[in-house]
Image (cartoon, rainbow, N blue to C red):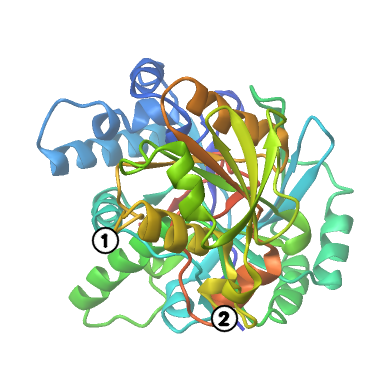
Amino acid sequence: MPVFKPFRGIRPHKDYESTFPTHPLDNFTQEEIAEKAQVEDTYINMIKPYVVSKSKDIDRNLRKIRSTFEELMDENKLVQDNSAYYLYEQIYPNKQVFRGLLGLASIEDFWNGKIKRHESTIPQKKEKLAHYLEKVNLQAEPVLLTYPANSKIELLMNHEEKNVPIFNHVDTKGIRHKIWRIDNRLKLQQFKEVIDQIDAFYIADGHHRIGSTALNAKHQKDKNKRHNGTELYNFVYSFIVSNQSIKIHDYNRIVTDLNGLSNEEFLSELEKYFLIHEKGETAYFPSQKFHISMYLGGKFYSLHVKHDLRSQEMSLDNLDHHLLDKFIFKNILKIEDPDSSEKIDYVKGTSNLEGINDLKEKVDSGEAVAGFGIYPVSFNDMIKISDLKLSMPPKCTFIEPKLVTALLMYDMKQ
């Protein structure tokens, strides 16, 4: 059973709780980040030396972030709770609800395989984030972990929701965020007992965040001759949700050229691997696994992976993203490393035609020559890939809920 323990959450004072948190930075352009960084007493303003500073002295910039954070604590603009679990719920405008528990997962469990991953990570990105953690000692965005639903945990959360939340706010996207603090000793024990029944956690979102936290923990462990695994740096701020509280959307691809092939030649090459059905100008969302939607030359096509090319057992050849990489990008377009190629870009899907139309717009605008819509990866396939210790290509799963940064934070120094 993996460890999941309470922590002393740091959150904005009630006067700043609607303005301090932010959506993740990758939601904004650099210009938007620079503009938001000018607003005082916000998270982006706090990390301004890291995201918009012209100074090349990175360590100095990071020390400035830490000192600003400590000033906000001294001024009571940020407050720290006693040790607690937090029940966190998002309610979307369409009434869809995501909920789970905020707490700390153990990096030891990540190392020993009790926290399982399904995607590979980029070493340089992990190293950069690990250096940030070493100097700032603050985790502001939780890793999203999932597990097969447990009715006892659901019952405890149902009971907790009858209380008044400590946070209840609607953001600019119309999503309501609600948080309940669970710090009663008896309740903490009840939650711990049922959470301890979970065999493993699976990373749904945040592979680089947990990877960088693990890298920082290793660096600290190597320097600490008295390391025993209970140190604050040895835990990662996490949001655990059951498979009933995540939504896996499609994550699609566009390509900028066809390696010198005409549309007709490209279609002819595709026939080696797919049964092709022209759909005309009507947007086509792939109807099931092994069916890929393609937009090319103003027309949609369905590409059905030929049966003899489909794996009968769970492997990477059982994943549409891998088959797209293998048959189309590598074999036909001669892109040796699809993961890093500048000819390929990624487009977040919506599990419906809206995401497919986003692909169409990018091709029609000339930004790309072809787009590929991929059926969403199932929860079961994600779990099987993780259990087999395989790695999907990057950006195969666009998973909700998307978490708010600095709604609650974890200080690795206190």
Q: Amino acid at mark 2?
A: Asp
- As drawn, the label of residue 387 is 2
The part of the image, by quadrant, that contains residue 332 is bottom left
- As drawn, the label of residue 123 is 1
Q: Is residue 41 above or below residue 278?
A: above
Q: Residues within 10 Å of mark 1 (few under 14, many from 20)?
A: few
Q: Tell me how many marks there are.
A: 2
**In what element is the residue under mark 2?**
helix
Q: Is residue 270 above or below residue 50?
A: below
Horizontally, is 21 left or right of 369 in the view? Answer: right
Distance from the alpha carbon under mark 1 to that under mark 2: 22 Å
Q: Is residue 352 above or below residue 123?
A: above
Q: Nearer the viewer, residue 209 or 285?
A: 285
**In what element is the residue under mark 1?**
helix
Q: Nearer the viewer, residue 70 or 325?
A: 325
Q: Nearer the viewer, residue 254 or 386?
A: 254
Q: Position of residue 79 (x, y in %)?
A: 52, 40
- As drawn, the label of residue 374 is none
Q: Which image quarter holds the N terminus?
A: bottom right
Q: Is residue 343 above or below residue 146?
A: above
Residue drawn at (68%, 28%) of the image: 281
Q: Position of residue 92 (x, y in %)?
A: 76, 35
